[in-house]
Image (cartoon, grey):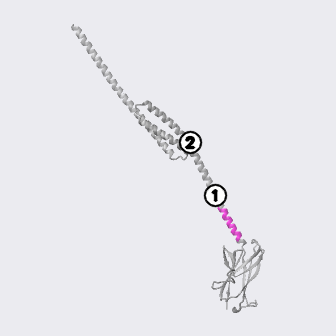
C-alpha cells in the first residue's frame, strides 16, 4: 500500500511538472507570436505609410503638370487621373494596416496609375518639344519679318531720298537777276519820282532733268514795310498745300536749256524808299529770291 501511494504521488508530480512545462511553453510561444504579430503590424503600418506617401507624391506630380498644360484633352485626362489617385489615397487611409490583401490591391492600382501618368508625361514632353520648336520657328519668322521690315524701311527711305534728290535735281532755279527802273515811256530812269515801271530781267538755269513744257512763272514783290504788291486780292496760286497771293505772272515754254526772260511791274502805288524783295515761283517751288534797293 505504501509503495502504491508513493507511486501515485510521483506520477502526479510528474503530471504537474509536465503540465507546468506545457503551460510555460505555450506562454512563451504566445508571447513570441504576439511579438512577431506586433512586428508584422508595425511593418504593415510602415508599408501603408510608404504607399500613402507614394500616392501623395503622385498627386503633387499631377498638380505640377496640370498647372503648366494648355492642351485641353491632356488636361482633362490628367484631372481624371488626379481625382482617381485622390480617391485611392482616401481609401488607403481608411484601410487597416492589417488588411494586407486590400493594401496590395491599392499598391497594384498605384502602379497602374503611375504607368498611365508616365504615358501622359511622355505626351506632354512631346507637346512641349513641339511647342518649343514652334516658338523657335515663330521667333525665327519674327526675326526675318523684322529684318524684312527694316530692309523695307531702309529701301523706303532710300527711295524717299532718291525721290528727293530727283526732285531737287529737276527743280528749276533762277541763275541771274537784275532790276531796271523805267519811266512812263519805258525808258531807263534813276529819278525816284519818275519811276513808272519795274523791269525784272532773269535767267532760268539749264536743267535737262526738269520736265519740259508750258509753265507759269509767278513773282511776289514785297515792299520795305513788308507789304506785298498785288493788283488784285484774287491773284493767288497754289504753294505748299495752300494758296498765296502773287504780284505778277508770266507763261513760258521750257525745253531744258537756259531761258532768259523779262517780267514787268507797273507802278500804280506810292513807292517806298528802301530794300525790296522779289521771290520767283514755278512748278509749285520757290526757285529764287533776290533783293534790290530804291533810293531817292
Q: Up-down: is 114 above or below 11?
A: below
Residue placed most toward the observer, 51 or 85: 85
N-terminal of the pair, mark 2 or mark 1, is 2
- Judged by depth in the image, the label closer to the viewer, 2 or 1, is 2
Which quadrant of the figure has residue 229? bottom right
Residue 21 in the image: x percent, y percent? Answer: 30, 19
Question: Callout 2: few (<14), some (14-19), or many (20+) C-alpha neighbours within 10 Å?
Answer: few
Question: Callout 1: few (<14), some (14-19), or many (20+) C-alpha neighbours within 10 Å?
Answer: few
Q: Is residue 159 magenta?
A: yes
Q: Does residue 24 appear to the left or right of 181 in the view shown?
A: left
Q: Does residue 4 appear to the left or right of 119 in the view shown?
A: left
Work out how far the residue at label 2 is from the one at label 1, CA to CA, in angstroms: 35 Å
- What secondary structure do most residues of the magenta stretch adopt? helix
Residue at disc 1, secondary structure: helix
Disc 2 marks which residue?
123
Residue 192 in the image: x percent, y percent? Answer: 69, 91
Disc 1 marks which residue?
147
Question: Quadrant where the C terminus lies?
Answer: bottom right
The residue drawn where x is 28% and y is 15% is 15
Residue 177 in the image: x percent, y percent? Answer: 72, 82
Question: Quadrant where the N terminus lies?
Answer: top left
Q: Is residue 202 magenta?
A: no
The label number, if any, that marks residue 130 in the structure image: none
Please give the range of residues in magenta.
153-167
Q: Up-down: is 236 above or below 145?
A: below
Residue at disc 2, secondary structure: helix
Q: Does residue 171 appear to the left or right of 58 in the view shown?
A: right
Which quadrant of the figure has residue 11? top left
The outermost residue toward the left is 2
The residue drawn where x is 23% and y is 10% is 6
Residue 77 in the image: x percent, y percent? Answer: 53, 41
Amino acid at each position: 500500500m505504501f509503495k502504491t501511494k508513493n507511486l501515485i504521488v510521483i506520477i502526479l508530480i510528474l503530471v504537474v511538472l509536465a503540465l507546468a512545462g506545457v503551460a510555460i511553453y505555450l506562454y512563451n510561444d504566445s508571447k513570441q507570436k504576439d511579438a512577431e504579430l506586433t512586428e508584422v503590424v508595425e511593418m504593415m503600418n510602415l508599408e501603408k505609410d510608404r504607399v500613402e506617401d507614394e500616392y501623395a507624391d503622385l498627386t503633387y506630380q499631377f498638380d505640377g503638370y496640370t498647372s503648366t498644360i494648355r492642351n485641353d484633352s491632356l488636361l482633362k485626362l490628367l484631372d481624371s487621373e488626379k481625382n482617381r489617385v485622390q480617391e485611392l489615397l482616401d481609401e488607403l487611409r481608411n484601410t487597416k494596416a492589417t488588411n494586407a490583401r486590400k493594401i496590395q490591391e491599392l499598391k497594384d492600382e498605384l502602379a497602374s496609375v503611375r504607368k498611365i501618368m508616365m504615358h501622359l508625361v511622355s505626351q506632354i514632353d512631346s507637346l512641349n518639344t513641339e511647342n518649343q520648336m514652334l516658338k523657335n520657328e515663330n521667333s525665327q519668322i519674327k526675326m526675318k519679318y523684322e529684318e524684312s521690315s527694316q530692309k523695307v524701311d531702309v529701301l523706303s527711305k532710300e527711295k524717299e531720298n532718291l525721290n528727293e534728290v530727283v526732285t531737287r535735281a529737276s527743280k528749276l532755279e533762277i541763275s541771274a537777276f537784275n532790276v531796271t527802273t523805267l519811266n512812263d515811256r519805258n525808258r531807263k530812269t534813276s529819278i525816284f519820282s519818275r519811276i513808272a515801271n519795274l523791269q525784272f530781267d532773269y535767267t532760268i538755269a539749264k536743267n535737262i532733268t526738269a520736265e519740259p513744257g508750258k509753265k507759269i512763272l509767278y513773282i511776289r514783290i514785297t515792299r520795305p514795310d513788308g507789304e506785298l504788291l498785288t493788283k488784285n486780292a484774287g491773284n493767288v496760286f497754289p504753294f505748299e498745300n495752300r494758296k498765296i497771293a502773287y504780284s505778277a505772272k508770266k507763261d513760258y515754254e521750257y525745253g531744258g536749256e537756259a531761258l532768259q526772260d523779262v517780267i514787268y511791274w507797273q507802278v500804280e502805288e506810292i513807292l517806298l524808299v528802301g530794300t525790296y524783295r522779289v521771290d520767283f515761283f514755278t512748278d509749285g517751288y520757290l526757285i529764287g529770291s533776290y533783293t534790290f534797293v530804291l533810293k531817292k
